[in-house]
Amino acid sequence: MCRGIANRGVAWASVDLPPASANGSAHRTKRLSIWLTVAFAAAAIVGGGMMSRAAQAENADISIRRATERTSFSNDEIKDGFFKTAFHAELQFDRPAERIRKFDEPVRVFVVNRGAPDRSAEIATIVADIHARVQNLDLAMSADRKRANLVVTLVRARDFAQTIRSRYGEDKANQIQHSLHPQCLSGIGKDQSYRIRRAEVIVPVDDGEFQFYDCAYEEVLQSLGLINDDSSVPWTMFNDDVQMGFFDVYDQYLVNILYDARVRPGMTKDEVVRLLPEVLPTVRAWVANANSPSGAEFDNGSSASRP
């Protein structure tokens, strides 16, 4: 999840996506879900070389968490986390709608770098890691802003609040800041069928390496549709008290349920409950394979064509 310094706030805000008249959500750095209407601003192009720190050794704090991560969960534990993160919203400005929200098309990620250090390469690494661990999710980077439907904006921490104002407008930005005190933010825009049509993530790059990874993983994952934070689920990064900095096994279960082809945008909780006995064995097999030593060799089934 998107942590922050001491207080990781995460907020969701609905995004108005012309011309599709979509609704949506936006999510702040340590997480509370809100619904509002915003418009995406045009983004700049990504600057040159995608190398740098992504090739360095893993952050020590992440390595410690990875080594002590719990990886075995009952079906009930997985279902509990899924229903609490996929259907609820902690603070809503729009009409409540407890429905599945997800992309049903290829997700192309474009990075706008306005910060230093430039962490564009790290975002590409995160995107590749998520793609490798989620079956049926066609997720990839794009160098073409017009083809992208998920824009990640990297900013200096001191420019974060101003970036929110420029994206969401003064009134909504004030509500986000005063209610949620965010350290990073993500937003989704959905259509009438609850299909996510566009998403945006804003992440500061200079609050420290661990904070960056924790924030970036959480926000990118939440922009895929798991919009709620819940402090009663102790294993998910979508919990204010949990810091991971990597795509943990428990959250792999949750995202893989969401992107199972049988789980459709707009489904109710009752509809998903009826599907889970069929979906969970598939998800368990996939997550086990994705985390095996040879897991990187498995095709995630998305038939992704890399632009």
Image (tube, grey):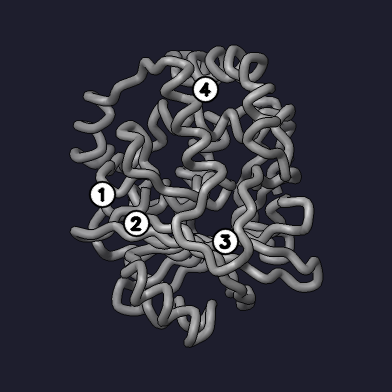
Q: Which residue is label 3 attached to? A: 25
Q: Which residue is label 4 attached to? A: 296
Q: Nearer the viewer, residue 14 or 300?
A: 14
Q: Amino acid at mark 3?
A: Ser
* Circle 3 residues within 10 Å: few <14, some 14–19, many ≥20: many
**In the current view of this chain or complex, which residue is farthest to the right?**
19
Asked if disc 2 and disc 4 are in contact, CB closer than 8 Å, the reply is: no
Task: Using the numbered discs, state the Cα–Cα distance from disc 3 to disc 1 in whole angstroms.
Answer: 26 Å
- Indicate which disc, 3 or 4, sits on the residue closer to the N terminus: 3
Residue 72 visible somewhere in the drawing: yes
Q: Which residue is label 2 attached to? A: 30
Task: Using the numbered discs, state the Cα–Cα distance from disc 1 to disc 4 in whole angstroms.
Answer: 24 Å
Q: Amino acid at mark 1?
A: Phe
Task: Using the numbered discs, state the Cα–Cα distance from disc 2 to disc 3 in whole angstroms.
Answer: 15 Å
Mark number displayed over residue 57 = none
> Which tag is nearer the camera, tag 3 or tag 4?
3
Q: Could you say which quadrant of the image residue 62 lies in?
A: top left
> Which tag is nearer the camera, tag 1 or tag 2?
2
* Circle 4 residues within 10 Å: few <14, some 14–19, many ≥20: some
Task: Using the numbered discs, state the Cα–Cα distance from disc 3 to disc 4 in whole angstroms.
Answer: 32 Å
